[in-house]
Amino acid sequence: MQNAKDSFYVAMRTRLSAINPERTILLRSAVRPGILVEEAEAPFAQPASAAPFPLVPPNVFVLRWLALAVDMDLPLTMVAAECEILYSTLGTQSFGGLDRGRAMSEMDQELLAMLAPFQTPKVNYTVQPAATMLTQVFWDEPVYTPMVMLRDRLTRSARVIVYSYQEAGE
């Protein structure tokens, strides 16, 4: 499933760069597109008051991998993983954060645009050069959660189920 997770992330990152090249994050002294995978980064500091959502960097999409399921009753084994995409905003400094609702709507639209079309080629990024595999990675439409306000921060998440057929050697 790692190839499918990597392929999904790279597709989202590439699409975000095309949709909004200004949405970036400075992480470990490098400017990157404003999307990251939680399990591949250092933990974020979490105050106890962060429930029900963890605090994530503002104006960035954070992919979090949750449940995993396997269907072996098919000619090829199909794996499904639930991906939660968290994002939050404080609005902009120039408007004193009063535009955070508009900023959240903009991120909602960006996420929907990143997810379409609902498939991407599966690629093995552990070899050089990266090798395109024989199957696709595909996913469902997103299910958005209600927006949560914590002081001056608006937070939302969306969940998608990401599917992939296991290929030989995976």
Image (cartoon, rainbow, N blue to C red):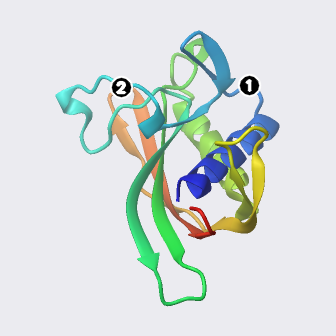
Q: Is residue 6 left or right of residue 87?
A: right
Residue drawn at the location 40% of the way across and 65% of the way down: 68
Residue drawn at the location 54% of the way across and 26% of the way down: 91
Q: Nearer the viewer, residue 112 or 126?
A: 126
Distance between the alpha carbons at the discs numbered 2 and 1? 23 Å
Seen in the picture, residue 132 relative to 87 is either above or below; the reply is: below
Q: Return the residue found at the far top.
A: 29
Residue drawn at the location 61% of the way across and 41% of the way down: 107
Q: Amino acid at mark 2?
A: Phe
Q: Which residue carries the number 2 mark?
A: 44
Q: Return the residue found at the far left.
A: 48
Q: Residue 20 sits in which quadrant? A: top right
Q: Is residue 146 visible?
A: no
Seen in the picture, residue 110 relative to 165 is either above or below; the reply is: above
User: In this figure, what is the number of numbered marks?
Assistant: 2
- Give the percent coordinates (x, y) of residue 33: 67, 29
- Give the percent coordinates (x, y) of residue 50: 26, 34
Label 2 SS:
loop
CB-based contact (under 8 Å), mark 2 and mark 1: no
Q: Nearer the viewer, residue 119 or 95?
A: 119
Q: Amino acid at mark 1?
A: Glu
Q: Is residue 78 visible?
A: yes
Seen in the picture, residue 19 relative to 79 is either above or below; the reply is: above
Q: Earlier in the sequence, mark 2 or mark 1?
A: 1
Query: In the rendering, which numbered label is found on residue 22?
Result: 1
Residue drawn at the location 74% of the way across and 25% of the way down: 22
Split into 4 quadrants, where in the image is the C terminus?
bottom right
Q: Return the residue found at the far front.
A: 169
Query: Which of the two discs, 2 and 1, sits closer to the camera?
Result: 2
- Give the percent coordinates (x, y) of residue 101: 54, 37
Q: Is residue 144 left or right of residue 107?
A: left
